[in-house]
Amino acid sequence: MENKEQPNNETFFNDLKDSASLYIEQKIELGKLTAIDKGSKLGAKFISGLILGVLAFFAMLFISLMLACYFSQLFQSYFAGFGLMAALYFMLFMMVMLARKSLIGKPIINGIIKTIFEGEQSNEN
């Protein structure tokens, strides 16, 4: 009777080992796919942000040139018009430098964290 139980135990442990191996392989594959999903979302947001940033840069460049020319005509001096725009941009630069952590750093960090952990709350519930 003991011989009859022995093969059942071996079969059980072999099946358990195979199931554990399959589970671990599938968990690793799920981790890879999740990382790819999160990375692709971050990449897409980065590329779209980059495109929007370039477009905003060119819009601001031409608006600045337009304002500089307007101020030049207003003051009847190219030096004064373009100097005023340079002074405005220098003041804007200084304000951003003083508040860069709260204006730029935290929103970027929070956006990346939100993208990485997006959808995990629904999976936990």
Image: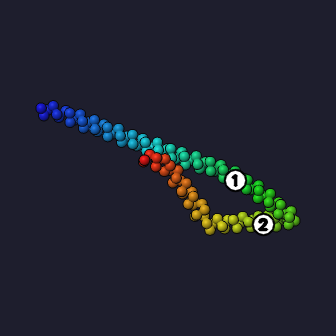
Q: Secondary structure at mark 1?
A: helix
The location of residue 108, given as percent across then percent down, is 57, 57
Q: Quadrant of residue 2?
A: top left
Foreground residue among 119 and 66: 119
Residue at the front extreme, as displayed: 125
**Is 27 on the left or on the right of 93, as rendered?**
left
Percent across and percent down for residue 34 are 47, 44
Q: Amino acid at mark 2?
A: Leu
The furthest residue to the left: 1
From the viewer's perspective, tell me whether residue 22 is left or right of residue 122: left
Label 1 amino acid?
A: Ala
* Residue beneath disc 2: 84
Residue at 24% x, 38% y is 13
Point out the tag, 2 or 1, that comes first from the N-terminus.
Answer: 1
Q: Position of residue 50 (x, y in %)?
A: 63, 50
Q: CA distance from mark 2 to mark 1?
A: 21 Å
Q: Position of residue 32 (x, y in %)?
A: 45, 43
The relative height of residue 107 versus residue 39 in the rendered view (above or below) is below
Name the image quarter holding the N terminus: top left
Quadrant housing residue 102:
bottom right
Residue position for label 1? 56
